[in-house]
Amino acid sequence: MASDGEVTEECDRLIPLVDIDPRDERFRITTRRASDDLHLSIGRLGLRVPPLVVPGAAGFIIVSGFRRIAACQGLGWDSIRARVLQKASPYECTLKAIAANSLERPLNLIETSRALRLLDQYAPGGQAPPEHAAALGLPTHAGLAARLKTLCGLPAEVQDAILEETVSFAMACEIGRMEEGLAVDFARLFRQLKTSLNKQREILTLVAEIARREGINPRQVLTEDRLSRLRDAQDLDRNQKTQRIRKLLRQRRFPALVAAEDNFQSLRQRLALGSNLQLVPPRDFEGTRFTLTLNFESVEEVSRLRVKLDELVDHPDFKTLLTGKGRGFGEAPVP
Amino acid sequence: MRVVALYIDAQVADWPETASICSRFDGPIKTVATADEVYADVAAAKDPVRRGKQVLYLTRNKGAYIRQCPGTSHYTCCGYKILHVGTFCTMDCTYCILQSYFHPPVLQYFLNHADLNAELEQLFATRTIHRMGTGEFTDSLIWEPWTGLSEALIRKFAGQDCCALELKTKTTFIDTLLDLPHRRRTILAWSLNTERVIGSEEQGTASLGARLNAAARCAAQGYPLAFHFDPVVINDGCEAEYRRTVERLFAVIAPRHIVWISLGALRFMPDLKAVVQSRFPQSKIVYGEFIAGLDGKMRYFKPLRMKIYRAIAQAIRAHAPDVCLYFCMEDDEVWQDALGFRPADRGGLTRMLDDAAVRQCGLGNGSRLG
Ligand code: SF4
């Protein structure tokens, strides 16, 4: 798959480290930066697998082995043994760079994205044959590959959130369609809350719809005072913050519905039903049938519940619960 | 929206009605063996819904012309019948359910009117009271520039005594209808809304003033009228705006001309939301306080519906205490709250509307349905 007929030659050479430019990351696939783990092993055992480099305009360009070279530099070495590609086209270098990573270990989403993008960038004609991607263990489904390719172009904080797995692939694709500042704001929020995809989706939709409804920028919704205070609250853990932020956003998106829920809740509390009697309203107060559940173990308990039910029937708040829907349960009991 | 291309089903290509429509059309005309080519044209467009409004397909109605209105469970339906004369519309309302109803949506006009007439004759022969309309899958009067459909229907209904025809529209295409011998068997109906909703959500429709003027001209010719506050759109300040619309209605139309007025808050199948978001990114209409109704449609949170209904009903009642006022697809709780009674108290919604049709359209000699 490597070529147009010519055989790429490779030779082992001792190269001064100053001749390798570590800032040229055009073939970099790995997202790992730290090389401390390699320090120890290379320091003790030496460089067992030589990095792959290609001659550039001045010195050498790294094709694979970024972390190994960084470790050697960290160890204060002057030179290293490397494999040097001769007469290799950028596309051949790309294939080798990807293979050195993808055939050794599973790539993460950002690495996969980089690999797919690199293939397109250097493929003759601008698009790599799917069989090349397949041979490298990369996804070949066109839609999936297209979405994956966008990931490595996202702002660094979004990529970090993907690598940390606080933002899933699906959510990253949604965030990726937003303008940069907003994408970063969401990535920060989700990294902070570390919440499930469903809750992230809910938050994202609520923010977008509040913004549309109120004719403001979604970033204004995310930076609103009450929301910022919740994010900064020292006395709340992540789950509590998530829950309150969702409630706050729901309140703003569905003010009448949430107010009615709250009013219903406080009226229900005033009924002091106890733990053996549960009153559930129709979903979203749309239907007209309420559900009353009785829990009991003995005849005595049923007897007590009967008394409770009799009290309930005469309770003015109970009537309001059943008839106050048109007013959102918010006003004085219906006479 | 202008129709820019005309497709003709080969089966109707040499019919006189086809020639008549072609003579009134000045764009490209193509005869096709099947609808597939038309669907392909529409589906290939960047905005198939928009394209579907610009391509007219003349064909046959291969199913029934007269259909039962597809009311949904849990909400009170009015027992209406649909006269299925065509599909889709040249106007472009953001909330139009037809955008996601047909796949793909195509402006179709059915020409096998012999079948239509036969079905009508059969229904008339039952001598039972019926109300029916052509405005369910299309706007009733958009066909006027090309066809004589409304005239033919008005004449047809004038010749019998048990069925009322309702032509429901947002246009003002009434000139050809004014002098017809209608015998009050045809009700001309307009959807009404606030100026704001008409301006922002009902592209290509007539203004409120134009609709009301057209209605007044029809009333002057003795036509019974109906008005539909549907969809009622809830937003800040809407109560005052709907009251203003009611004021404007009664400033030009006397209550005695009105057969019925309906109220129906905006409701839609969930998949319409994405269509509206993509076709009308400026519209805020899908960002109201919607919940999933018992029939799966998105509806405004019920207390909000009740509140706006109370306000509009009160305004209407102040001008027309006796007019037949009803809700389209609401439950007893809403009826009781906004109007103070449930349909069952008055024999059911079907009965209420049949009575109104009998009274206002002079229907008679017929026995009631159900
Ligand atoms: S006038 Fe009626 S049929 Fe036409 S687009 Fe508007 S809602 Fe749809």
Image (cartoon, coloured by chain):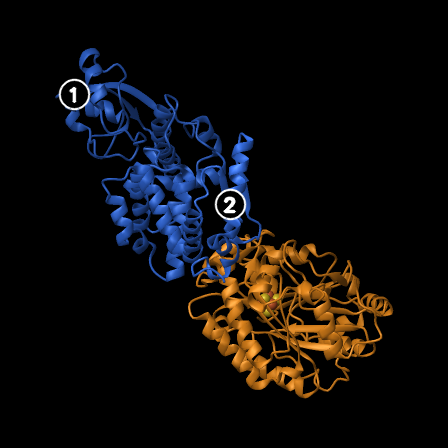
Chain letter, blue in picture: A
* Discs 2, 1 touching: Cβ within 8 Å: no
Instruction: Please tell me the numbered disc located at residue B155.
Output: none
Residue A302, above or below A45:
below
Please, which residue is most extreme toward the top here? A45
Tag 2, which secondary structure? strand
Residue at 39% over, 22% down = A103
Q: Residue beneath label 2, please?
A: A280
Q: What residue type is labelled 2?
A: Val
Residue A23, above or below A214:
above
Q: Which of B272 and A233 is in front in this view?
A: A233
Q: Which of A72 and B200 is in front in this view?
A: B200
Q: Which of marks 2 and 1 is in front?
A: 2
Q: In which quarter of the image is residue A119?
A: top left
Q: Where is residue A235 in the image (x, y as percent from the top left)?
A: 24, 39
Label 2 to label 1, Cα distance in Å?
75 Å
Chain letter, orange in picture: B
Residue at 49% over, 70% down = B197
Q: In screen coordinates, is B285 left or right of B74?
A: left
Q: Is residue B72 visible?
A: yes
Q: In screen coordinates, is B207 left or right of B189?
A: left
Q: In which quarter of the image is ligand 1?
A: bottom right
Mark 1 within 8 Å of ligand 1, using the beta carbon: no
Q: Nearer the viewer, residue A85 or A202?
A: A202
Q: Residue beneath label 1, please?
A: A79
Q: Which of B64 and B125 is in front in this view?
A: B125
Quadrant occupied by the N terminus of chain A: top left
Q: What residue type is labelled 1?
A: Ser
Mark 2 within 8 Å of ligand 1, using the beta carbon: no
Q: Quadrant of residue A243?
A: top left
Label 1 marks which chain's residue? A
